Image (tube, helix red, strand yellow):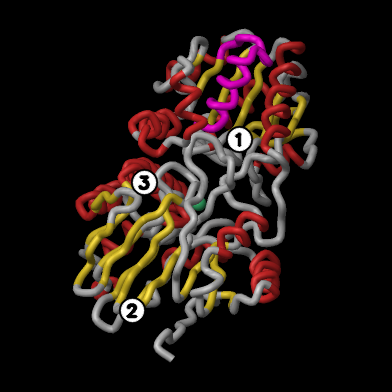
Amino acid sequence: MTGSCHLVDTGGKKVLFDCGLFQGGKEEEALNAAAFPFDPTAVDALVVSHAHLDHIGRIPLLVKQGFHGAVYAHRATLELAEIVLRDSAHIQETEAVWLSRKRQRLGLSPAQPLYTQADAQAVLAYFQGADYGQRVELGEDLSFTFHDAGHILGSATVQLAAGGKTVVYSGDLGQTGHPIIRDPERVTGADWLLLESTYGDRLHPVREDVREELAAAVDLVVKRGGKLLIPAFAVERTQEILYELSLLLSTKRIPKIPVYVDSPMAIAATQVFVRHRETYDAEFRSFLDAGNDPFAFPGLTFTATAEESMALNNVKGPAIILSASGMCDAGRIKHHLKHNLWRPETVVLFVGYQARGTLGRSLLEGAKSVKVLGERIAVKARIEQANGFSSHADQRGLLEWAKGFRRSVRRVFLVHGEEKATENLRELLEKEGVAASVARFGAAVDLTV
Ligand SMILES: [Zn+2]
């Protein structure tokens, strides 16, 4: 599911698609420190699909272990990747300090971070930006082209042409109708396809329902006079919510109340969105052309400093606070939860998946009290959930997209999905007459036979 990383060996050159971090659970995360199942010094180029940590999070390790080729990605992806990798390094360092203290008390040697800020910084020298549709030459008879994957800003599907054959790597595919960015581009013609399968066994609800759920949560907090806390991922989900809020404001579906974005990472990511107008879809462009600005509307405040963030404790409701992390396991959202969960006028709206073991999951499951920043806090707030926000194509979306390859593709390899989802999608593809296999971690496939 996580730790995306695929190596294509053409015989002459080695090209890596993504180099992601393993996430979710101790067992998976332990894989991050393990050696790569290939020699990093022998890889010629790394082609990156998008800036999510499970696709880029191990690049600093790759460079640390001797990789010295170019790291190609869409220009917007490189800007987001810098933010995401710096944040990841910061988390690694913080965790190592905490772990070292614990180890020292046991008389053990200090813990080393997976990588440091300096390691993340070192990666930037290898970055080479490309645009959608631009053909990038990697060597004789070897090139690739990015197509818009419609997943997050800058996300790409990679079409690699090598010796007259084509390998397509879907990256993560977006949902049709996803706001701000364009829909996944139809790509056709590939001999082999690596297809993500996150939602290979599920269908998403209709988009309008999500907008109404958000509006209903705002109504609720206006009535109660409290704060609406929205834990949201800093990249994409925060900007998506801002767009939805400004849309609801423009149609007067919700009243004007103060909106705060309280996450340094989300603020930096929003600036990347502002810089990359060329990636916007027609709907978003016309919303902007009509004089709206989802990233700078009246009542919207970005609170960058810690002082500004703390000052939000004294803000009287109703107000909306968007803060990271999306699962409440880190970041400033924890402070807002500590100060507001015990107040009955507070509303918490979850707009993303909450993994098992996270604070967000406990709240969703109806915990009467939770431990936040070392303190036990009673949960008197109303906990709500909007289910339809998704950056991923659902089963129908994946199948429709894969049909573009039906005539040419020899085999589809399903990646990036949990067992049930991948198996489900494999069966459906086979029913459509497309040969499909579930990729296994560490397995190699000979494409010449
Ligand atoms: Zn992703």
Q: Position of residue 155 (x, y in %)?
A: 43, 49
Q: What residue type is labelled 2?
A: Asp
Q: Are marks 1 and 2 in contact (CB under 8 Å)?
A: no
Sequence-wise, the earlier of marks 3 and 2 is 2
Q: Name the residue under label 2.
A: 9
Disc 3, SS: helix
As drawn, 329 above or below 137: above
Image x and y of residue 120, in percent:
30, 50
Please identify the quarter of the rendering in which residue 433 is found: bottom right
Number of residues whose C-alpha sits closer than 10 Å to that of mark 3, classed few (under 14), some (14–19) or many (20 or more): many
* Label 1 CA crowd tier, 10 Å (few <14, some 14–19, many 20+): few
Q: Which amino acid type is marked by label 3?
A: Thr
Q: Is residue 56 visible?
A: no
Q: Mark 2: which secondary structure?
A: strand
Q: Which residue is drawn at 58% across and 15% down?
A: 250
State which region is magenta: 239-258
Q: Which amino acid does label 1 sit on?
A: Gly
Residue assigned mark 1: 374
CA gap, disc 1 and disc 2:
50 Å
